[in-house]
Amino acid sequence: MNGIFTSLQELLDRLLEVTSFIILPDWNDVIQHMLPAAVVLFLVGPVLTLLVLYWLYQWLHMPRFRVRPAEVGPVPVPRDETGQPLIPASVPYCSFDGLLFPAKETRCSECRHELSVRCPVDDTLRSATEQTCAACGTRYVLGASDTAIAVQRRSGPPAGGEAVA
């Protein structure tokens, strides 16, 4: 019976040692060994997790295509079979150089002359700076929309790849 009492006493002493280590730890050992692990676990870990989640969000919301705005500049006036110019309505053009210009242009980049515009209603010619047709009274502004862009089409598959049939 004495042996059982002694073993119970030893078990109780061990339990008190473990409990005293948890309740009253040696703070020098705790700070020296546990602080670096706590900094990594509670500070660096969440910051890295947030960075990875933000990168993943950006990657998922990234557009999968690229729009390349075309360089819009003067283009030659198209001609019919007899060689007469086919000037579209409401498009500024230079009659001296035979060039069509983007809608906001008012002067020719080649000869510096003022551009002309053909009225879409009665086909009369007017200056590109005038907003009202003198013949029919139609009022319009060339290039009124700032949001329109010209998009360049690709001539083939993207660089480094081929179309799969």
Image (tube, grey):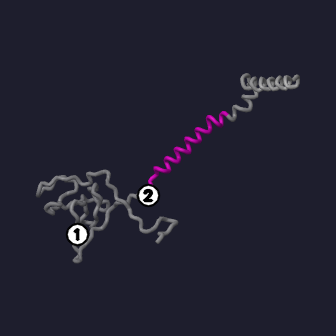
Residue interval drawn in magenta: 38-64
Q: Mark 1 touching mark 2, by CB under 8 A?
A: no
The residue under label 2 is which amino acid type? Phe
Q: Residues within 10 Å of mark 2 (few under 14, many from 20)?
A: few
Along the viewing direction, whichever of 42 and 62 lies nearer the viewer: 42
Q: In the image, what residue occupies the spot 72% across and 28% down?
A: 31
Question: Compared with residue 54, is residue 121 higher up or lower down, i.e. above or below?
Answer: below
N-term-proximal mark, 1 vs 2: 2
Along the viewing direction, whichever of 72 and 161 lies nearer the viewer: 161
Tell me which secondary structure the magenta stretch mostly adopts.
Answer: helix
* Residue 165 drawn at (x, y percent): 46, 72
Query: Label 1 belongs to which residue?
Result: 86
Q: Residues within 10 Å of mark 1 (few under 14, many from 20)?
A: few
* Residue 11 drawn at (x, y percent): 81, 26
Q: In the image, what residue occupies the spot 24% across and 59% down?
A: 115
Query: Label 2 belongs to which residue?
Result: 65
